[in-house]
Image (tube, grey):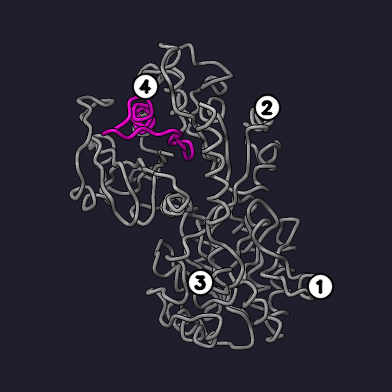
C-alpha cells in the first residue's frame, strides 16, 4: 500500500511545533506495517543540504508564478519529495511569518501550490509510484481534496486516490479572500458551503474537512471536543455532520529521538535503574537558568509557545504559589510579547526561583526533560500535546489540564491510581488559576514523599508513549480506504 503524506514541516529538518515531530516519526513506523510512505514537503532553506543530495523527478515550468521541481531524496529514515519552488519557499526567517511577525502575504499561493502538486501526484503518479491514499496534514494541505474533486468533475472516468484530512490544531484554518480562488485555479463550482467556502472566504481547512473521505485528529478526547462550539471554532457544525467519518488517533513520540538512555543532549544519560544520574542534569539546568538548588522541592519546567491557548497566563498568576513552596521554574519558549515580558519580569522578581530563556532551543528542551522533576502544561485546549509525552518518557512528571490529548495520556495521581501504582502525573480541572495552584501544591506534596514520587517516575517511564498502536490504527484506516476504491 502506498501513502503520500503532505505537510508544511517535518522534524528534524524544519519545525515550529508538534506537527513536525509527527511527520518525522509516523512514516518510519508505518513502513514496519508494510506501508510505502512518501513525504511531500516544501524545500525551505533549511533543506538545502538535503536537496543537493536528491534527484529531480518532475518539473513545473510555471507553478503559481515561477518554475518548480520535485526532488526525491532519502534522509533521516524518510523517503521525501521536496517541492523546490524558490519563488515560494526560499526566504529567510519563519516558514509562515515575515520579519514583522505576520503571515507571508502569499501563503495562499505557497500552500495552494503544495496542495496542487500533491493532487497531481495522486492523479498521475510520480516516477512509477502512485499513492492509494493521500494524508493531508493541517490547513496547509487542505486544498488537496478540492483539486482532486475538481479533476473528477472535469472527467468522471478518472480514478482519484482516497484522501484523509488530519487536524492537528483547528485553531489554524487558512482563511483567505474568496478572490484568490481563481488565482489558485479553483472552480467557482466548488465555492459553496459544502465545499471550500467559509462565510464568504476560501477556507483551506474547511475544504479538507468537507471533501476528504475521512477525517482524523490527534487524540480521542479532542475528536469529541471538536464537535462542540467551545472547541470546534466555527467548524463544529460541519464536523458533527461528518462525525461518522471522524476519528481520534492518539499521537505518539519517536522513541529513538526521545530516549533518556541514549540522548546526546543530556549531561548524563539514565534509565529506570539509574535515576540518581538525573541529578547531574538537574544541576546543569539550575546553572543554565540561574536557579538556586533546593533538593526538598521540585524543579518545574515549561517548554512551550507562550500563548493564552497554552494557559501560561494562568501560570504567571500562580507563580507566587510555586515560589512560596520553595519550588523553582525553568521556562523555555517564545510567542506572545506580553507573556514574554511577564515571565522575564518574573525572573527578575524571583531571582534564583524563576529562570527564563526566550527562544527556541531543541537541545535545551531535551535537557529540561532529562533533569526537571515536573513539566507544566496548563493548556486551555490541547489537541494532543507532545511535551507531556516526552515528560512521561523521561520521568519528568506532567502537571496538565484535563483537556484533549492531555487527558488521554496522563494518569492522575488520585488516591485510587496511587494505590494501584498507575499514576503518571497530575491532572487538574476546571482550567483556571486556582486549580493550577492546587495542582502545584499537590506536586510539591507528592515530591516531599520521595518513595511515592520515585514510584510515579518509574511508572511513567514504563508507560507506552510510542507510535506502535496508533500506527496500526492508521494502517487499518488506509487499508479500508484503499480497498474501497
Q: CA distance from mark 2 to mark 1?
A: 40 Å
- Of badges 3 and 2, the one in the foreground is 2
Residue 105 in view: no
Q: Is residue 334 left or right of residue 294?
A: left
Q: In the rendered image, which residue does mark 1 sit on?
A: 415
Q: Viewer-proximal residue, 431 or 101? A: 431
* Residue extent of the magenta highlight: 113-141
> Sequence order check: which comes first, mark 2 or mark 1?
2
> Sequence order check: which comes first, mark 3 or mark 1?
3
Q: In the rendered image, which residue does mark 3 sit on?
A: 369
In the rendered view, tell whether residue 286 sits above or below residue 259: below
Q: Secondary structure at mark 1?
A: helix
Q: Residues within 10 Å of mark 3 (few under 14, many from 20)?
A: many
Q: CA distance from mark 4 to mark 3?
A: 44 Å
Where is residue 102, by image quadrant?
A: top left
> Sequence order check: which comes first, mark 3 or mark 2?
2
Q: Residue at x 19, y 42 (%)?
A: 55
Amino acid at each position: 500500500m502506498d501513502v503520500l503524506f503532505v505537510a508544511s514541516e517535518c522534524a528534524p529538518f524544519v519545525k515550529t511545533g508538534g506537527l513536525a515531530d509527527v511527520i518525522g516519526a509516523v512514516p518510519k513506523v508505518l513502513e514496519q506495517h508494510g506501508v510505502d510512505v512518501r513525504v511531500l514537503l516544501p524545500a525551505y532553506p533549511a533543506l538545502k543540504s538535503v536537496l543537493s543530495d536528491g534527484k529531480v523527478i518532475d518539473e513545473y515550468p510555471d507553478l503559481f508564478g515561477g518554475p518548480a521541481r520535485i526532488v526525491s531524496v532519502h534522509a533521516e529514515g524518510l523517503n521525501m519529495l521536496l517541492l523546490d519552488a524558490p519563488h515560494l519557499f526560499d526566504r529567510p526567517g519563519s516558514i509562515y511569518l515575515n520579519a514583522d511577525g505576520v503571515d507571508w502575504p502569499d501563503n495562499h499561493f505557497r500552500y495552494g501550490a503544495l496542495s496542487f502538486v500533491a493532487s497531481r501526484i495522486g492523479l498521475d503518479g510520480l516516477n512509477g509510484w502512485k499513492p492509494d491514499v493521500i494524508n493531508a496534514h493541517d490547513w496547509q494541505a487542505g486544498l488537496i481534496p478540492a483539486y482532486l474533486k475538481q479533476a473528477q468533475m472535469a472527467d468522471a472516468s478518472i480514478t482519484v486516490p482516497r484522501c484523509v484530512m488530519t487536524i492537528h490544531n483547528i485553531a489554524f484554518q487558512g482563511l483567505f479572500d474568496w478572490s484568490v480562488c481563481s488565482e489558485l485555479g479553483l472552480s467557482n463550482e466548488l465555492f459553496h458551503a459544502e465545499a471550500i467556502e467559509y462565510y464568504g472566504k476560501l477556507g483551506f481547512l474547511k475544504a479538507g474537512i468537507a471533501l476528504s473521505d475521512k477525517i482524523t485528529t490527534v487524540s480521542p478526547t479532542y475528536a469529541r471536543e471538536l464537535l462542540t462550539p467551545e472547541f470546534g471554532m466555527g467548524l463544529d457544525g460541519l464536523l458533527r455532520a461528518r462525525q461518522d467519518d471522524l476519528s481520534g488517533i492518539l499521537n505518539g513520540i519517536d522513541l529513538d529521538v526521545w530516549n533518556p538512555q541514549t540522548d546526546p543532549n543530556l549531561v548524563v544519560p539514565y534509565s529506570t535503574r539509574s535515576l540518581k544520574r538525573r541529578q547531574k542534569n538537574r544541576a546543569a539546568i539550575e546553572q543554565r537558568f540561574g536557579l538556586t538548588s533546593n533538593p526538598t522541592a521540585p524543579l518545574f519546567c515549561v517548554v512551550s509557545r507562550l500563548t493564552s491557548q497554552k494557559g501560561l497566563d494562568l501560570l504567571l498568576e500562580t507563580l507566587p504559589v510555586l515560589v512560596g513552596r520553595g519550588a523553582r521554574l525553568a521556562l523555555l519558549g517564545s510567542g506572545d510579547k506580553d507573556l514574554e515580558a511577564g515571565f522575564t519580569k518574573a525572573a527578575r522578581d524571583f531571582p534564583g526561583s524563576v529562570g527564563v530563556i526566550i527562544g527556541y532551543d531543541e537541545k535545551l528542551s531535551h535537557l529540561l526533560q532529562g533533569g526537571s522533576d515536573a513539566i507544566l502544561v496548563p493548556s486551555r485546549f490541547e489537541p494532543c500535546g507532545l511535551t507531556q509525552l516526552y515528560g512521561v518518557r523521561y520521568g519528568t512528571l506532567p502537571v496538565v489540564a484535563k483537556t484533549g490529548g492531555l487527558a488521554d495520556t496522563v494518569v492522575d495521581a488520585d488516591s485510587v491510581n496511587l494505590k494501584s501504582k498507575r499514576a503518571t502525573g497530575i491532572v487538574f480541572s476546571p482550567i483556571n488559576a486556582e486549580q493550577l495552584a492546587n495542582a502545584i501544591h499537590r506536586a510539591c506534596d507528592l515530591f516531599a514523599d520521595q518513595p511515592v514520587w520515585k514510584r510515579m517516575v518509574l511508572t511513567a517511564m514504563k508507560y507506552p508513549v510510542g507510535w506502535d498502536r496508533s500506527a496500526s490504527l492508521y494502517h487499518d484506516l488506509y487499508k479500508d480506504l484503499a480497498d474501497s476504491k
